Image (tube, rainbow, N blue to C red):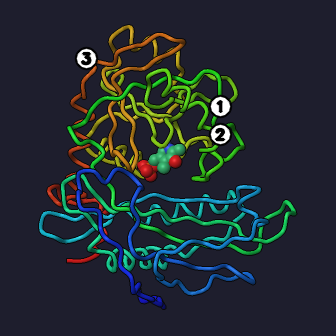
Amino acid sequence: MEINLTINRTTAPKQKPADENSLGFGRYFSDHMLMMDYKNGAWSQPRIEPYHRLSLDPASSVLHYAQEIFEGLKAYRRADGSIVMFRPWENAKRLNRSADRMCMPPVDVDLNVEAMRRLVELESDWVPKSFGTSLYLRPTMIANDEALGVHAAKDYIYYVICAPSGSYYATGLAPVKIKIEDQYARAVKGGMGFAKTGGNYACSIKAGDDAVKAGYSQVLWLDGEEKRYVQEVGAMNMMFVIDGKLVTAPLDGSILPGVTRDSVLTIARDEGMIVEERKLSVDELMDAIKDGRLTEAFGTGTAAVISPVGVLCYHGVDHVIGDGNIGKVSQHFYDTITGIQWGTVEDKYGWILKVKD
Ligand SMILES: *Cc1c(COP(=O)(O)O)cnc(C)c1O
């Protein structure tokens, strides 16, 4: 797609982090960012500018009423030096579904993907080389009316920043300990659980913080009404292998429709595994653990791809999943998806966008 993109290159390139093994996540940012402004009912043409601070009025609506959405996707450098992105169209479409829920204007999907591709191309020196590392893209849209009235804003800013990020698993797929949250709620029916919006995170921080203090890495949310059905983990969807079937919560409006979730389900169905997108009660889950019918549990998300769960804590009791190590099914999905990303497994679903040879 041909787009009208202005590029204003930095005259002061930053020093790149020297050690790819200690990049961490979202701590360094590249030289440029993508920007678009929404004013008078229309988006401006996209422009790439030197990375810079935003100047917002203290009354800016995003700061008061949290009308904001974001996305997260990655660009990878393959062994042959080429750079690719994974299913960016899905992120661009989801951004617009989030935008609709938050009463914000959509961004043309093709324009958005091509503008992000051009940004990554310009920042190609910022895409790290080691296996497992990536350039993480953070598209963000904020409301920016300079007034305190509570209503949909008229002015918005859309921008994309890039963060070279380290391998999630420096030493292989290490299982995590997860606490099932029985006190706080993240999302309710009719709420905004399916939207990637800061508010869902703001209301999660306390639960996550308590879990970390108790020795767990994240919480597994239950439905907001009955605290009975399993939903998802902080920034990952959850999957369980029960009686050899892959079970995950349905997209009922309160969980985030993850791109990785969809990728896993697509591969599983294609390979003949039985997939059940259905309500899974925490009681059924506990029974399946006790009976030994639950053999694996794992989270899915862009950051880690697959995150095996070794321990699930419910009402203060730790339950070890399988033998506490990564299971065969989890490993297989991890290998397949990262293989497609790194070019060692055929991309038969058309999930790869080439950025640069
Ligand atoms: C982003 C996110 C996910 C994972 O989605 P992916 O597209 O797979 O990265 C899951 N849950 C929540 C709440 C999220 O914000």
Query: Is mark 2 in CB contact (under 8 Å) with mark 3?
Result: no
Q: Amino acid at mark 1?
A: Ala
Q: Is mark 1 within 8 Å of ligand 1?
A: no
On screen, residue 357 above or below 93: below
* SS category of the residue bearing label 3: loop
Between residue 175 and residue 56, name the one nearer to us. Answer: 56
The picture quadrant where one finds residue 322 is: top left
Residue 62 in view in this figure? yes
Earlier sequence position, callout 2 versus callout 3: 2
The residue shown at (48%, 91%) is 4
Q: Is residue 81 left or right of residue 230?
A: left
Q: Nearer the viewer, mark 2 or mark 1?
A: 2
Residue 86 x, y percent position in the rendering: 33, 61
On screen, residue 317 above or below 282: above
Mark 3, Cα crowd under 10 Å, few <14 / some 14-19 / many 20+, is few
Q: Is residue 249 left or right of residue 80?
A: right
The residue shown at (45%, 34%) is 248
Mark 2, Cα crowd under 10 Å, few <14 / some 14-19 / many 20+, is some
Q: Is residue 55 left or right of residue 220?
A: right
The residue shown at (42%, 76%) is 32
Label ID, residue 323:
3
Residue 108 x, y percent position in the rendering: 55, 76
The residue beneath circle 1 is: 185
Residue 207 x, y percent position in the rendering: 59, 30
Mark 1, Cα crowd under 10 Å, few <14 / some 14-19 / many 20+, is some
Q: Amino acid at mark 2?
A: Cys
Query: Is mark 2 in CB contact (under 8 Å) with mark 1?
Result: yes
Which quadrant, please, contains the N terminus? bottom left
The residue beneath circle 2 is: 203
Which quadrant, please, contains the C terminus? bottom left
* SS category of the residue bearing label 1: loop
